[in-house]
Amino acid sequence: MKTKVLIDLCLLDNLNTGLGQVSYSFGEALSKVQADDMDFTFLVPKTFAGKFGTQVSYLAVSKKYRYFPFLLPKFDVWHCISHRARYVPVDFKTKIIFTIHDLVFHLRQGVQRKRTIRRTQQRINEMDCICTISNYVAGDIRSHFDLKGKTIEVVYNGIQQMDANQEKRPDFIQPERPYFFTIGQISERKNFGVLLDMMKLMPEYDLYIAGENFREAALQMKAKIEIEQITNVFLPGTVTEEEKNYLYNHSQAFFFPSLFEGFGMPVIEAMRLGKPVFSSTFTSLKEIGKTFSFYWENFEPKYMKTLVLNGLADFYTHPEKIEAQKQYASLFSYEKNVEAYLNIYRKVAKEKKKRNSLYTLFVRYFTMMFH
């Protein structure tokens, strides 16, 4: 008898975020796999029903499942792509797997921080298996939460193959100007603001920061750019996949000064295309970048500039290092990612289910309703 597996891909409703992209890529890769011992159902926004072909079944998101979760079909295994999932089964027999990408309570304060910690612990209590995307996140969970004797499985993110031939030059590119590139939601955690003063010292280069640019951090950067007349930094907003490919392919280097990353997918994307990566040393970035990235130990502008110029000179005169970097980045494939999860599904399905108390199911129900 086949194991019935539900994959929660609700985060497809925002493809401009990292989790949205992860959800799409994972669904696409899993739908191509032949697993004769499992039947897969994807929980998706209505517009994505059928998007991944006929190899899988679909369950469309509906408010009735949040308020009346007992109406959900029965599954043996339920995998939530994020621990902040909006839908969780209340069936006693269903094994629950969550993938924790990062612990955002670090970014919050006061009551909001306490609430986030409490909800995360509640989710950990519900899980039959905890998965994370890096050893850094796994260690962070062990340090701050009671695992109730559960183990953690580390499964690195997959990175989609990037076709250098599928690119489109964005209209906002300044002709005949060498440029640097970075991408991500322009928020406080991404720390893109530290690049402005460095770029003032590098007038011969431009910098493009692609990503959602309407949050407070982005507005502050725009104001600084205007007031200080920084003419070589641009915040064009979100870009298409073809435009992103172009921006990576033709850049001189990729910058990633982030303060908080569970993994850091853009780092691997840039490495795959043979670009030097300059990043911060925080959270998971040294684990993922290893010896291939150049690291800013601080954000003093002159120091940052010197590291970039020296790094560029070193990187582009050692083609063997570039090839080694590409080979390393190629290890982060969705084939490996999906295979690891298939093995986890099989393992969890065979394990004896620890019976949840009625209190646990009650908490799960109300956490889902008001999450």
Image (cartoon, grey):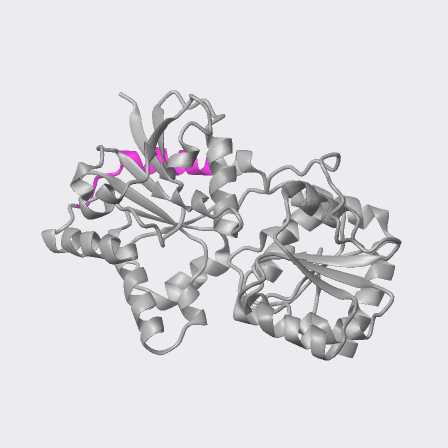
Instruction: Tell me where residue 225 sits by quadrant.
Output: bottom right
Give x and y (percent) for residue 203: 85, 70
Our reading of the magenta stretch's main secondary structure is helix
Instruction: Tell me where residue 254 sits by quadrant.
Output: bottom right
Q: Is residue 96 above or below residue 119?
A: above
Q: Which of 354 and 121 is in front in this view?
A: 121
Relative to 158, 57 lies left or right: left
- Is residue 138 visible in the rendered image? The answer is yes
Q: Nearer the viewer, residue 78 or 45?
A: 45
Residue at horizontal 25%, vertical 52%? Answer: 126
Whether the magenta-drawn stretch holds residue 49 is answered as no
Q: In this view, does 248 lie above or below 286?
A: above
- Is residue 91 visible in the rendered image? The answer is no
Report the magenta residues as a range. 339-354
The total number of labels drawn is 0
- Which residue extends farthest left? 358
Residue at horizontal 18%, vertical 37%? Answer: 71
Q: Which of 7 and 186 is in front in this view?
A: 186
Residue at horizontal 87%, vertical 66%? Answer: 204
Instruction: Tell me where residue 160 sits by quadrant.
Output: top right
Quarter of the image with the N terminus in it: top left
Give x and y (percent) for residue 134: 50, 54
Residue at horizontal 58%, vertical 63%? Answer: 186
Relative to 78, 250 lies left or right: right
Q: Is residue 187 above or below residue 269?
A: below
Quarter of the image with the C terminus in it: bottom left
